[in-house]
Image (cartoon, rainbow, N blue to C red):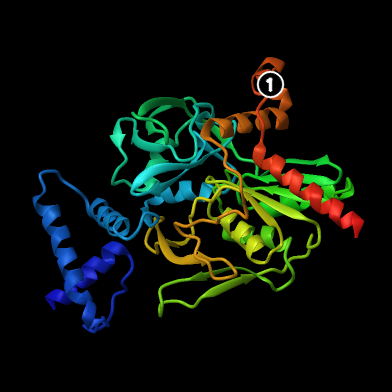
């Protein structure tokens, strides 16, 4: 009866185990689940009773769950009600913060990509920068969600990051003033020359595919004969949106991506191309770099595997794990749990590997920043002076130029057939 009482107490604290009418508990004997739950509950009670400072059960249980998930992998995490609310705001297009996407590399908090024209971008943060401290607090051992929480905040308040760049010998302090971050999914849609269209996706949020389709229709009306899809610096987002984007260029029922979890725990799931708007025949080039992650890699991988287009740029980030958000039944908290990995249509694992371009065009750190700034000046000309633009006028986007050259050659060849 003591074991049953402890198990029920543990279940009540987690809000996950219902009361039952008897002592029967189904467990896997090889895992000693019953005994381990008893041990955890016992230790919670000991901490509650004897620690030098007083703690309530919610604090202790939240801490226990955080530790458990942190021990699994770098993407699994516990979200208290406040953190869960902030997570749901991530894909709505606006929030208060500094404007960077982050991940974990070798247990170190790392910038995946800065969002252009945000405080983080203006402070010079770049893909690959390691964030060692936030407001003097060491980030080693912390979670992604904790880091996001510390960096977000009201507009006008500052946050100090200790940053080690890829080419730096010593970390530097970066003082950043938070602002409201407005994220636009689709930018730069235009005809570059002779029917070659350009379209850039900055993330995969809820409206991304619809906005892209609207832009493609407008480009089509202007004489689009080929397309350059720019996914550089796009850190990803929603799986559904990556499928909707990829299927625009694929044949009906072609595989876009599959997800596979632990053997025996869940079935492999496949996402195939359907949709109503398609551009299957126009020449296509996809631009990627090390800031292209997750959903961007799904799109690039599908295009590459089906030989639908040419991938140009640098090897992508390699974020190919699937996180499922599971809400609590007892409060507004949730867990973000890694449940599967992404695989390209040919069965390639993306995670920690990335997508290698068909044509590699390397761009250095400073060169890439100059490209970004010049591009920003072009896309929002009213926000900058002639003096601002003059400083970056000589920046050359070698990856984009390579894409234009390739498509120009393809169109010439097609015209001669």
Q: Name the quadrant containing residue 244.
A: bottom right
Residue extending farthest right: 416
Q: Along the line of sight, which residue is nearer the eye, 352 or 157?
A: 352
Label 1 Cα neighbours within 10 Å, binned few <14 / some 14-19 / many ≥20? some
Q: Name the quadrant containing residue 305.
A: bottom right
Residue drawn at x 45%, y 26% is 176
Residue drawn at x 13%, y 54% is 47
Residue drawn at x 51%, y 75% is 268
Question: Can residue 185 be seen from the camera position used here?
Answer: yes
Residue where numbered disc 1 is placed: 389
The quarter of the image holding the C terminus is bottom right
Residue extending farthest top: 387
The quarter of the image holding the N terminus is bottom left
Labels in figure, total: 1
Asked if residue 126 is positioned above or below residue 313 in the image, the reply reads above
Asked if residue 37 is positioned above or below residue 409 in the image, the reply reads below
Q: Along the line of sight, which residue is nearer the eye, 176 or 306?
A: 306
């Amino acid at each position: 009866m003591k074991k049953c009482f402890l198990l029920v107490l543990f279940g009540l604290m987690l809000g996950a185990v219902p009361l039952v009418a008897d002592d029967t508990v189904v467990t896997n004997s090889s895992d000693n689940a019953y005994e381990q739950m008893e041990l955890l509950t016992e230790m919670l009670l000991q901490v509650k009773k004897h620690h030098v400072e007083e703690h309530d059960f919610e604090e202790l249980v939240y801490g226990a769950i955080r530790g458990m998930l942190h021990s699994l992998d770098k993407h699994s995490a516990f979200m208290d009600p406040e953190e869960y609310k902030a997570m749901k705001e991530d894909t709505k297009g606006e929030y208060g913060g500094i404007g960077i996407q982050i991940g974990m590399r070798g247990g170190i908090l790392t910038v995946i990509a800065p969002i252009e024209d945000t405080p983080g971008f203006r402070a010079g943060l770049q893909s690959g920068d390691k964030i060692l401290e936030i407001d003097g607090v060491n980030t080693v051992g912390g979670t992604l969600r904790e880091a996001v929480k510390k960096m977000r905040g009201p507009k006008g308040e500052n946050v100090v990051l200790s940053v080690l760049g890829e080419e730096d010998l010593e970390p530097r302090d970066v003082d950043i003033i938070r602002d409201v971050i407005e994220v636009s999914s689709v930018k730069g849609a235009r005809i570059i020359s002779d029917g070659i269209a350009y379209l850039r996706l900055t993330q995969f949020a809820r409206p991304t595919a619809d906005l892209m389709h609207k832009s493609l229709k407008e480009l089509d009306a202007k004489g689009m004969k080929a397309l350059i899809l720019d996914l550089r610096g796009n850190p990803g987002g929603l799986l559904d949106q990556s499928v909707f984007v990829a299927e625009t260029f694929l044949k009906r029922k072609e595989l876009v991506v599959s997800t596979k979890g632990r053997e025996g725990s869940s079935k492999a799931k496949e996402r195939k191309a359907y949709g109503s708007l398609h551009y299957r025949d126009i020449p296509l080039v996809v631009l990627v770099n090390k800031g292209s992650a997750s959903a961007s890699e799904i799109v690039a991988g599908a295009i590459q595997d089906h030989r639908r287009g040419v991938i140009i740029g640098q090897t992508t980030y390699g974020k190919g794990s699937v996180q499922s958000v599971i809400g609590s039944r007892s409060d507004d908290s949730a867990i973000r749990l890694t449940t599967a990995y992404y695989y390209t249509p040919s069965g390639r694992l993306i995670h920690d590997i990335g997508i290698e371009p068909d044509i590699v065009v390397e761009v250095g750190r400073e060169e890439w920043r100059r490209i970004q700034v010049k591009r920003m000046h072009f896309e929002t000309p009213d926000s900058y002076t002639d003096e601002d633009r003059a400083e970056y006028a000589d920046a050359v986007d070698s990856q984009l130029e390579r894409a234009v050259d390739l498509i120009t050659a393809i169109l010439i060849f097609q015209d001669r057939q």
